[in-house]
Image (cartoon, rainbow, N blue to C red):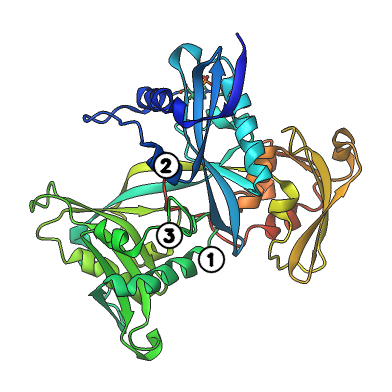
Amino acid sequence: MSLTVRPVEYADQPDYTRLGAEAFGTPAAGRPVPTREEWAAAGFREWGAFDDGDLAARLRVYGFTSWFHGARVPTAGVAGVAVAPERRGSGHLARLFGAALDEARDRGDVISTLFPTAPGIYRGLGYEVVGSFDDVDVPVQNLGRVAAPDGVVTRRAGVADFDAIVAVHRAWAAAQNGPVSRAEKPFWTPPEKFFADYTGVTLAVSAGGSAGAAGDVVGFASWNRGDGYTPATAVMEVDDLIALTPDAARALWRTLGSFSTVVGTARVSTSGLDPAWLVLPDLTSTVHAANPYMLRILDVAGALGGVQAPLEGARVPFAVRGGQDLAGAWTLTVSDGVTHLERDAIAVEDAHHERPVLSPNGLALLYAGAESAANLRIAGHLTGLPDQDAVLSALFAGRRLHVRDYF
Ligand SMILES: CC(C)(COP(=O)(O)OP(=O)(O)OC[C@H]1O[C@@H](n2cnc3c(N)ncnc32)[C@H](O)[C@@H]1OP(=O)(O)O)[C@@H](O)C(=O)NCCC(=O)NCCS
């Protein structure tokens, strides 16, 4: 059989759609093939592996920016990965990813991320789990125990508040590693559609005094009320609950808590240790669904260079082994508050004796600030000279991993 890997064209859409429906299930109404206009306007890139002309494997790449280390980083988000059942286990994925990620790198993407159905599918390709996007069930009745906010009130948002909501999301996201910036398709939403997607968007607003100028928006929650008014069965879904102050968090949680006579559960999207949850007084929430998030570096110098770093004067030679496109040796220095990377002419096989050596997965974990150098050694993702481990750990560890958009 001859395997051809190429971008998917509109003429391939019936096969592409059918393979996706087979893999991920078909809604009762069936999964329609997009019109040419819908497909062209969607803004993603699709790739296929064709066995003697038949579509054997497919994926989709979204090009967007995500926040890492205080900057918006060009990211290739991969989704909709599927191999035809009869062709599974043939190693098609490696070639499909090779082509799609080469193109992403050429376009300037320096990292790639995805939500796996199983992490083992992507480990060999250099991806590693760096965080998790979770839906967590919070008993609404207990939210009445959250302390009353001081100097923050809530009010319903309207279209005129859209820029303030975007600003709250940006202020929060810039302080994390991982959040999708929502500045590009398919995550950018026109204001009217954003509000049409929810029953309500509630703002936390400063009442003046120490909480900021009166009227400042310091948090928001976007929610869908759900059906019914029996607390035992009614569930409301909260997509974002983002607070820039503890009183904003208290105000938003208590507003959700005011539904306690008619809604039993608030299903709230979150990730990791979320600061907005630090005002909750009990431990009664449970994870309803967890979506681990994986990351791969596409361009070592592009991703690790130019990063805001506090360790002025630091100098760390390191190497990456394996992962054809990532293997090599570099020296990282910090000057003027940012990292600089210079390529070293040293064989990776010889690097163990004189510098730390990372696997592609270790590189992903380190960059995301998800693991310390000590844990990378325990996991087998870091070998070689250990004397710079403390610096390596500190360089990229300044922000926690959070992601709030599924694709
Ligand atoms: C998951 C799927 C894409 C894998 O296809 P495949 O042809 O078996 O993949 P490959 O043979 O190229 O194997 C790639 C790697 O995935 C691993 N893998 C395959 N199925 C796996 C599973 N169910 N759990 C964990 N790892 C798995 C293989 O061991 C291999 O690992 P290696 O590179 O370390 O050797 C295919 O089974 C499929 O289409 N499943 C249904 C849809 C789906 O789950 N898609 C993934 C969406 S994120």
Would you say 47 lies left or right of 239 here?
A: right
Residue at image coords 38%, 84%: 211
Residue denoted by label 2 = 291
Q: Earlier in the sequence, mark 1 or mark 3?
A: 1
Q: Tag 2, which secondary structure?
A: strand
Marks 1 and 3, how far apart at CA: 12 Å
Q: Which one is in front in this view, the residue at disc 1 or the one at disc 3?
A: 1
Residue at image coords 55%, 22%: 49
Q: Tag 1, which secondary structure?
A: loop
Q: Tag 3, which secondary structure?
A: loop
| Residue 321, disc | none
| Residue 274, disc | 3
Q: Estimate how packed mark 1 is, as few (under 14), some (14 to 19) or many (20 or more) residues with alpha carbons within 10 Å.
A: some
Residue at image coords 64%, 39%: 103
- In this rendering, the count of numbered labels is 3
Residue 166 or 308: which is nearer the viewer?
A: 166
User: Ligand 1 closer than 8 Å to the CB at disc 1?
Assistant: no
Marks 2 and 1, how far apart at CA: 22 Å
